[in-house]
């Protein structure tokens, strides 16, 4: 299955994003800050990252820059989410693939995610003729 790393410091929003993306068919992991996102993504690269820009320890913009520097994470699509008024200006200088403004509709997130990484569903192994 396609894996998504959600990076959001607000627990209720992180949970809502995780549940929604899981319902779409993704395996979701949630971390609360950019520092943990970089660590987790470099250890086990996800297929896509949804990341808040304003977080403690390491903000989303800096985390995106660090992720682009690692060979194993450089090409992972990053969808940033932000409530900042100047987020569009920031998005033009950050290494992200898309920006969603908070508050956003979950379907808007779903569209942004599925156009970049369609969900892959695991199919059970099927018996072949002659298998015993």
Image: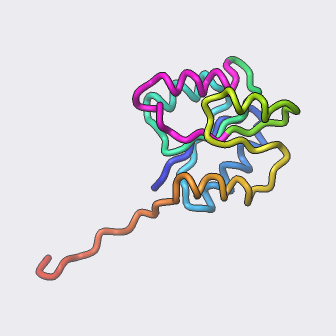
Position of 113 with respect to 132 (left or right) is: right
Q: Residue furthest bottom?
A: 129
Q: Nearer the viewer, residue 44 or 63?
A: 63
What residue do we see at 43% from left, 29% from top? 43
What residue do we see at 60% from left, 27% from top? 64
Residue 102, image quadrant? top right
What residue do we see at 67% from left, 36% from top? 51
**Above or below — where is 57 with respect to 19?**
above
Which quadrant: the C terminus?
bottom left
- In the rendered image, residue 77 lying in the magenta stretch gets the answer yes
**Above or below — where is 51 with respect to 28?**
above
Residue 35, image quadrant? top right
Residue 30, image quadrant? top right
**Coloring basis for residues:** rainbow
**Which residues, given as a range, are shown in magenta?**
58-79
Q: Nearer the viewer, residue 32 or 116?
A: 116
Which quadrant: the N terminus?
bottom left
Q: Residue furthest right?
A: 85
Image coords of residue 92 (percent x, y):
70, 31
What residue do we see at 51% from left, 24% from top? 39
Position of 30 with respect to 40 (left or right) is: right
Image coords of residue 108 (percent x, y):
73, 56
């Amino acid at each position: 299955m396609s894996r998504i790393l959600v990076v959001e410091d607000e627990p209720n929003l992180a949970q809502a994003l995780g549940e929604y993306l899981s319902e779409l068919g993704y395996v979701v992991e949630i971390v609360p800050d950019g520092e943990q996102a970089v660590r987790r993504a470099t250890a086990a690269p996800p297929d896509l990252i949804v990341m808040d820009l304003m977080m403690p320890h390491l903000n989303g913009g800096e985390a995106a820059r660090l992720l682009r520097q690692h060979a194993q994470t450089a090409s992972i699509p990053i969808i940033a989410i932000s409530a900042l008024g100047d987020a569009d200006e920031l998005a033009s200088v950050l290494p992200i693939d898309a920006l969603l403004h908070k508050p956003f509709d979950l379907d808007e997130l779903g569209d942004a995610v599925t156009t970049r990484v369609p969900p892959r569903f695991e199919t059970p192994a099927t018996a072949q003729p002659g298998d015993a």
